[in-house]
């Protein structure tokens, strides 16, 4: 009985370690999957038609739109589970996993949530005990530092804009506003698309939306045509015609005289605390 109790305790501790490893594996596989999807978008100059199915494919099959990607080599979620099986075998444990109900969503503008249900089937080769349990696992991935595909694809990959969250939004301060424009920082915006929507090229509004300002100077340096449109990214890169105006506060500021905003409902004029000229 003492031997059996010791064995059961050992396997129980192993299962706890497995749950920790699964969480870590899900995070790494999910992060790699997002990177691989972004790589596919820029390499193929094409947005993903359905981020939900594309993410599941990357996470489970190590492919994006049926194309292999080096970022996913040995890093898919099943790869992680296989490594755990190999470690279990070394201590005479048979372990099987079933992953289901994989979802990807956002709970705030800066975070992607990946959720999955895992069924653990653990059996001791010595026939002392077996376990069957289900765990709902959630991992969170920050979008800060990831590339915005809307900027890349709409500038022929000439301007790669990483998502950097503005740490100052006191736009009454002209220096803060100019820094925001120069670096195309991002702010939360319920009028803009979320990060996941941007992977699909969907520029509709979202409660998890973000927005940045397109720097016209950078467009000109790259030899790209400049539209007479609001510099807010999801408006500028859309085909929607919205009236806009030159901004008074930056009109006489060298290098910032190009700044335009939409003025239909004053939403962005109020957001950036500015007025039309």
Image: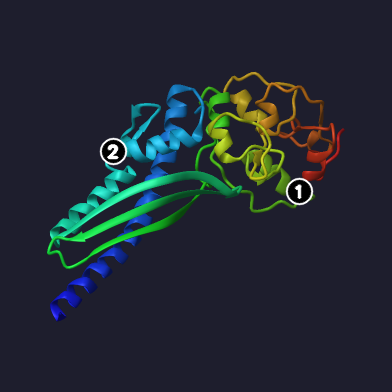
Q: Which of 170 and 239 is in front in this view?
A: 239
Q: Nearer the viewer, residue 122 or 246?
A: 122
- The N terminus: image quadrant: bottom left
Instruction: Report whether 156 appears left or right of 227.
Output: left
Relative to 258, residue 24 above or below:
below
The residue at which mark 1 appears reads as 171
Residue 98, position in %: x, y?
Answer: 33, 48
The residue at which mark 2 appears reads as 73
- Between discs 2 and 1, the one toward the N terminus: 2
Give the residue drawn at x 42%, y 38%.
56
Residue 76 found in image quarter? top left
Give the residue drawn at x 59%, y 19%.
223
Give the residue drawn at x 18%, y 53%.
86
Give the residue drawn at x 63%, y 39%.
184
Instruction: Report whether 33 appears left or right of 84.
Output: right
Residue 3, position in %: x, y?
Answer: 13, 77
Is residue 94 visible to us here? Answer: yes
Q: What element carries label 2?
A: loop
- How far apart are labels 2 and 1 at the CA level? 45 Å
List the single residue furthest toward the bottom: 2
């Amino acid at each position: 009985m003492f031997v059996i109790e010791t064995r059961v305790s050992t396997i129980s501790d192993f299962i706890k370690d497995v749950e920790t490893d699964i969480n870590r594996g899900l995070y790494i596989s999910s992060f790699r999957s997002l990177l691989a999807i972004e790589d596919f978008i820029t390499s193929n100059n094409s947005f993903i038609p359905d981020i939900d199915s594309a993410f599941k494919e990357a996470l489970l099959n190590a492919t994006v739109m049926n194309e292999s990607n080096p970022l996913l080599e040995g890093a898919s979620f099943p790869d992680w589970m296989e490594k755990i099986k190999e470690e279990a075998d070394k201590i005479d444990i048979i372990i099987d996993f079933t992953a289901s109900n994989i979802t990807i969503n956002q709970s705030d503008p800066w975070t992607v949530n990946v959720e999955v249900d895992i069924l653990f089937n653990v059996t001791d080769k010595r026939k002392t005990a077996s376990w069957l349990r289900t765990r709902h696992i959630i991992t969170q991935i920050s979008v800060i530092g990831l590339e915005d595909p809307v900027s890349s694809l709409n500038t022929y990959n000439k301007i790669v804009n990483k998502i950097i969250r503005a740490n100052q939004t006191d736009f009454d301060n002209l220096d803060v506003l100019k820094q925001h424009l120069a670096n195309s920082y991002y702010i939360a915006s319920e009028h803009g698309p979320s990060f996941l929507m941007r992977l699909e090229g969907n520029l509709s509004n979202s409660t998890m939306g973000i927005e940045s300002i397109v720097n016209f100077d950078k467009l000109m340096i790259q030899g790209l045509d400049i539209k007479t449109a609001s510099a807010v990214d999801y408006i500028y890169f859309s085909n929607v015609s919205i009236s806009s105006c030159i901004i008074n506060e930056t009109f006489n500021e060298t290098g910032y005289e190009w700044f335009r905003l939409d003025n239909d409902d004053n939403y962005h004029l109020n957001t950036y605390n500015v007025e039309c000229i």
